[in-house]
Amino acid sequence: HTCLEPVIVIMSVRRVPWVTSNHSRPMAKSHARRHLGRLHTRTRMGSDGDFVPSFAGGISPERFAANSLKRMITHAAARIVLKQMEGIAPQTGIGKSADPGAADVNAPHHHTDAERNVANIANRQKLLQDMLTDVPMGADPNEWLLELARKDGLLAVRVAEARKGYCQDGFGWDDVRRLCSEDVDTDNQTLLQAIMQEQYGGSDKQQSAQ
């Protein structure tokens, strides 16, 4: 009997120049920069000439990934600011002082600047914690920041600045590319092994049964 073995081809897509129907050659860098705002309308080709389709709304896969990363970075920035406030305020918890001799930050009146600062930090800390817990960060993290700004504008600005700093200097962009590439390679190997096991393992069982 002749067995038609399945042939599985996994093609990789690498970074290639953006081209348009009006350009037979890749755009120059200076020309490409003027079109960054309209990249999602371009036709992108893979390493073997395969068309890379856009996502819903006509956005490129890179823009889709960037939107997801921006939401994650905003969430991380909010947690960074929250942790900073936990370190500044001499507290073990919201509204509770670690120093038994210190004034209660929940008291209606604070007579010293130190007490007022602790109370202010504690209130903002609680607000940010509640926002992270109770208000989902949807597809647009700016909407979440605007909601925070309606309650405390300075706190929202602080989170926005932390987001910019983390994006530029803190986030491991090279690590993301490396980890994603490693995961894809590992997952493909696991997938191929599973497919081969399904194909050939099932054939062996059928032959044994016959």
Image: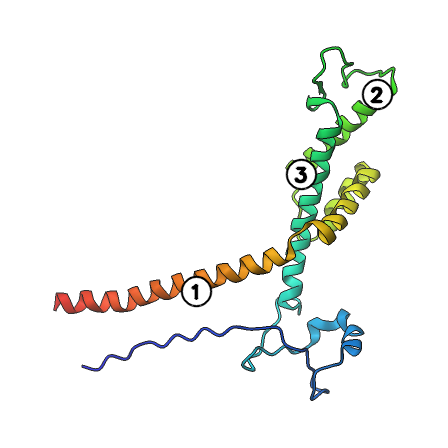
Q: Which element is circle 2 on?
A: helix
Q: Which mark is residue 96?
A: none
Relative image position of residue 8 (x, y in whole percent): 39, 74
Q: Nearer the viewer, mark 3 or mark 2?
A: 2
Residue visible at 87% across and 15% down?
A: 111
Give whichever of discs 3 and 2 has the lower sequence position: 2
Relative image position of residue 18 (x, y in whole percent): 68, 78
Q: Which element is circle 3 on?
A: helix
Residue visible at 64% across and 53% down?
A: 172
Give whichever of discs 1 and 2 has the lower sequence position: 2
The quarter of the rendered structure image containing the C terminus is bottom left
- Using the image, determine if residue 69 lies above or below residue 75: below
Left or right of 50 on screen, residue 35: right
Q: Is residue 128 visible?
A: no
Q: Which residue is mark 2?
A: 114
Residue visible at 78% across and 73% down?
A: 33
Q: CA distance from mark 3 to mark 2?
A: 27 Å
- Using the image, determine if residue 62 lies above or below residue 134: below
Label 3 amino acid? Leu
Relative image position of residue 28 (x, y in whole percent): 76, 80
Which class describes the residues within 10 Å of circle 2: few (<14), some (14-19), or many (20+)? few
Q: Which residue is mark 1?
A: 188
Label 1 amino acid? Asn
Left or right of 204 on screen, residue 79: right
Relative image position of residue 42 (x, y in whole percent): 69, 77
Left or right of 87 on screen, residue 30: right
The quarter of the rendered structure image containing the N terminus is bottom left
Q: Which mark is residue 132?
A: 3
Residue visible at 67% across and 58% down?
A: 67
Q: Is residue 33 visible?
A: yes
Question: How many marks on residues?
Answer: 3
